[in-house]
């Protein structure tokens, strides 16, 4: 099994509790993210199965996004069945928090955290792959280039949506982005006329109308927080009364216990105690629910990709263990793990583009490139 290091002082009990909630949510049909005729997400049939070029060995450290941690951990565990000689350590702690360590090639996984083997020291001191729930900025890319002399390699591994969660008992139908900005934002850059502090201001009646809104979010280490601020608040400041949790697991758990709560997190954190709101781009526009189709088309206002970044010197090959892992991510088996973790799989053309980026081999389909490994 791949080693999962929660990092950043995370309370593992939260992850265990959330896991139970997620299972309940799946069992009750809460993950209604359908693409296939049976109501289940399906991987693009043009993406072929993983074909190992050779048995490889080595260590790979993946660090960053808490949103991506359960996704990457599932992929890593499946990959071990094909390449048992590769040890993969998966660490959370937030995209923004891990970025500096990636740039400086310094992991926070302590010696011996990786596994119990004598070779556990191999994962100490470097981050091979940065897991980021947002794209790197121009400034961050320039920083990377100034340090290494070449551009960072960006590999989107899944589609996602930053979903707006409320307690399952909250009857609200949906929100516009202007309302969302007025709930969470201090500056109201989307132009809503007043701050929204009560549930009655977004249309709830009777006992709900005079109830205060309790805002939840994620801390400054989170790439999802950065994405939300840029996309939902147009770069405005968050209100001071947003209750910032240490990660999406603790946030969803808090919302499941707070009837008056509202928060944001990746779509893969749906659970039985919360529900997801559809969003409208602006007043008068239709509500759009987060689905694989709306994320792929961009019609859901807070759709995004999830990324792995690596250091690929154009004058040298990637280490075999890293290359094989990234090839596996873009295979049918890898994308199946994306689906099982609650995110949306890649379309075949994007998987093929990723593989071309990694190998320098042009191809019109992921199937052709993966098959060429035989």
Image (tube, helix red, strand yellow):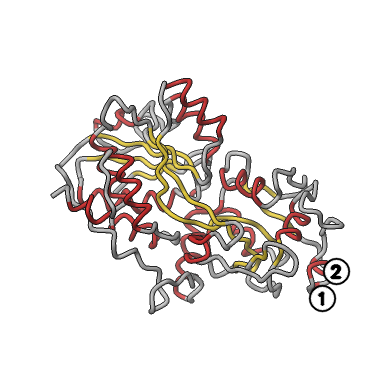
User: In the image, which disc is placed on residue 70?
Assistant: none
Count of marks, rendered view: 2
Please provide percent x and percent y for residue 50.
Answer: 22, 53
User: In the image, which disc is placed on residue 207?
Assistant: 1
Quick one: SS at disc 2? loop
**Above or below for 34 versus 11:** below
Quick one: SS at disc 1? helix
Viewer-proximal residue among 148 and 221: 148
Q: Is 318 left or right of 283, judged from the image as shown?
A: left
- Distance, label 2 to label 1, CA atoms, is 7 Å
- Which corner quadrant of the image does residue 237 belong to? top right
**Above or below for 12 versus 150:** below
Residue 12 makes an appearance in the image: yes
Viewer-proximal residue among 315 and 31: 315
Q: Is 164 left or right of 372, judged from the image as shown?
A: right
Please provide percent x and percent y for residue 179.
Answer: 76, 60
Residue 81 makes an appearance in the image: no
Residue at 38% over, 79% down: 38
Please provide percent x and percent y for residue 312.
Answer: 34, 31
Viewer-proximal residue among 301 and 262: 301
Asked if marks 2 and 1 touch (Cβ < 8 Å), the reply is yes
Please provide percent x and percent y for residue 183.
Answer: 76, 56
**Above or below for 238 versus 293:** above
Residue at 48% over, 75% down: 29
- Disc 2: CA contacts within 10 A as few (<14), some (14-19) or many (>=20): some
Residue that carries the numbered disc 2 in the rendered image: 210
- Disc 1: CA contacts within 10 A as few (<14), some (14-19) or many (>=20): few
Q: Is 28 left or right of 191, judged from the image as shown?
A: left
């Amino acid at each position: 099994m791949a080693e999962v290091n929660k990092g950043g002082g995370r309370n593992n009990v939260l992850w265990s509790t959330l896991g139970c909630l997620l299972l309940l949510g799946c069992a009750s049909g809460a993950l209604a993210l359908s693409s296939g005729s049976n109501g289940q997400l399906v991987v693009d049939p043009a993406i072929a199965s993983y074909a190992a070029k050779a048995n490889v060995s080595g260590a790979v450290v993946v660090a960053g996004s808490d949103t991506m941690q359960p996704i990457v951990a599932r992929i890593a565990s499946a990959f071990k069945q094909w390449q048992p000689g590769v040890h993969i350590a998966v660490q959370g702690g937030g995209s923004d928090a891990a970025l500096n360590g990636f740039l400086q090639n310094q992991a926070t996984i302590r010696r011996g955290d990786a596994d119990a083997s004598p070779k556990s020291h191999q994962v100490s001191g470097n981050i091979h792959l940065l897991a980021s729930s947002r794209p790197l900025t121009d400034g961050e890319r320039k920083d990377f280039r100034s340090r290494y002399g070449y551009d960072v390699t960006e590999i989107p591994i899944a589609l996602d949506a930053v979903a707006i969660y409320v307690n399952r008992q909250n009857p609200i139908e949906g929100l516009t982005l202007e309302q969302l900005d007025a709930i969470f934002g201090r500056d109201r850059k989307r132009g809503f006329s007043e701050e929204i502090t009560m549930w009655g201001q977004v249309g709830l009646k009777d006992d709900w109308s005079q109830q205060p809104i309790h805002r939840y979010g994620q801390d400054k280490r989170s790439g999802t927080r950065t994405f939300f601020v840029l996309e939902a608040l147009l770069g405005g400041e968050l209100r001071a009364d947003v209750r910032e949790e240490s990660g999406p697991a603790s946030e969803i758990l808090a919302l499941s216990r707070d009837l008056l709560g509202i928060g944001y997190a990746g779509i893969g954190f749906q659970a039985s105690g919360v529900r997801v709101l559809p969003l409208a781009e602006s007043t008068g526009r239709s509500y759009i629910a987060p689905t694989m189709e709306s994320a792929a088309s961009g019609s859901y206002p807070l759709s995004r990709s999830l990324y792995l970044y690596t250091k690929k010197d154009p004058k040298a090959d990637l280490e075999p263990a890293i290359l094989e892992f990234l090839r596996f991510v873009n295979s049918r088996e890898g994308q199946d793990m994306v689906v099982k973790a609650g995110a949306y799989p890649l379309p075949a053309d994007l998987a093929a583009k990723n593989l071309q980026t990694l190998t320098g081999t042009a191809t019109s389909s992921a199937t052709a490139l993966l098959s060429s490994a035989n």
